[in-house]
Image: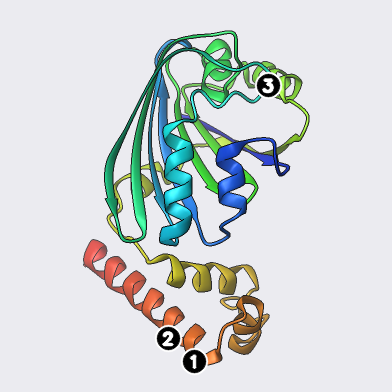
Amino acid sequence: MREFAFSLHFEPGVDRVMDAFMQAPGARSEAFLCSLDGEQSWRLERVVGPSAALDRIEDRLLAAGGESISGRPCDGEHYVDLLDAGPGHRVVYTYLSDITRCETVPRLATRYLPGGVLFRLARQGSEQRWQLLMRDDEKVGLLYDALSAALRDGLTFEFGHLDAASGWAADMFTSLTIPPDQHEVLATAAEMGYYETPSETTLDAVADRLDLPRSTASYRLRRAEAQLVEYYLSETL
């Protein structure tokens, strides 16, 4: 199996769902999608973040439709259901059928990649990160051209990689959920090189980046690390 990874970057005001993520830097989501034949697709998306941001993101996901990357809206049947809601998370199911006219990532991919494609989508800030799992990559070049040509003003495409697929099973079935405030500190520390050897930054610098007291940043980081260690040991011992 092969994996094609890329990112789409959105300017403010181009997409209402992505605007909601831009307005809430602590919010993020991960979704799995399947496009059955180009005219039908389903998506299961888990969103985590501050409660106020989740309410806004939930409302926009429930009304999002096909999320076309071109200037043409999607015609077709649209069914959405909120499967789960709790402190700090939402799970939204979306099913689209009889899709016509528009260009979505799954619809374009199904056109050029035969044999069924599984999609993974992550959203945070102004970025959508896509990973496509497929049998072969013979026509990925055609998909690349189609995606680039379809993008409306305000969207940009960034190539990630084209390689052998790896890590899908571990990511799909993990039960670990780190609270958004702890995830924010962990992700910032990793981005700044805190875990490099030797370390490229300090905890004080991480706390300053997030405008947090050092004690708060330290507590959240230790709690996130403890959960990661506990989960790893439970899965491997």
Q: State the residue lying farthest toward the right.
A: 153
Q: Which mark is residue 219?
A: 2
**Dots 3, 2 in contact, CB < 8 A:** no
| Label 3 Cα crowd, 10 Å radius (few <14 / some 14-19 / many 20+) | some
Question: Could you say whether the residue bearing mark 1 is in a helix, strand or loop?
Answer: helix
Question: Which scheme is used to colour this image of the protein?
Answer: rainbow
Q: Which mark is residue 215?
A: 1
- Please identify the quarter of the rendering in which residue 98 is found: top left
For the question of whether residue 108 can be seen, the reply is: yes
Q: Earlier in the sequence, mark 1 or mark 3?
A: 3
In front: mark 3 or mark 2?
A: 3
C-alpha distance separating marks 1 and 3: 46 Å
- Please identify the quarter of the rendering in which residue 33 is found: top left
In depth, the one of 210 and 112 nearer the eye is: 210
Q: Looking at the picture, how far across and down is residue 152, in whole percent? A: 74, 25
- Please identify the quarter of the rendering in which residue 35 is found: top left
Where 165 falls versus 184 (above or below)?
above
Q: Looking at the picture, how far across and down is residue 47, in whole percent? A: 41, 49
Q: Which mark is residue 129?
A: none
**Dots 1, 3 in contact, CB < 8 A:** no
Mark 3 — residue?
70
Q: Looking at the picture, how far across and down is residue 1, in whole percent? A: 46, 29
In depth, the one of 174 and 39 nearer the eye is: 39
Query: Disc 1 marks which amino acid?
Result: Ser
Q: Earlier in the sequence, mark 3 or mark 2?
A: 3
The residue drawn where x is 59% and y is 78% is 194
Q: Looking at the picture, how far across and down is residue 66, in whole percent? A: 51, 23
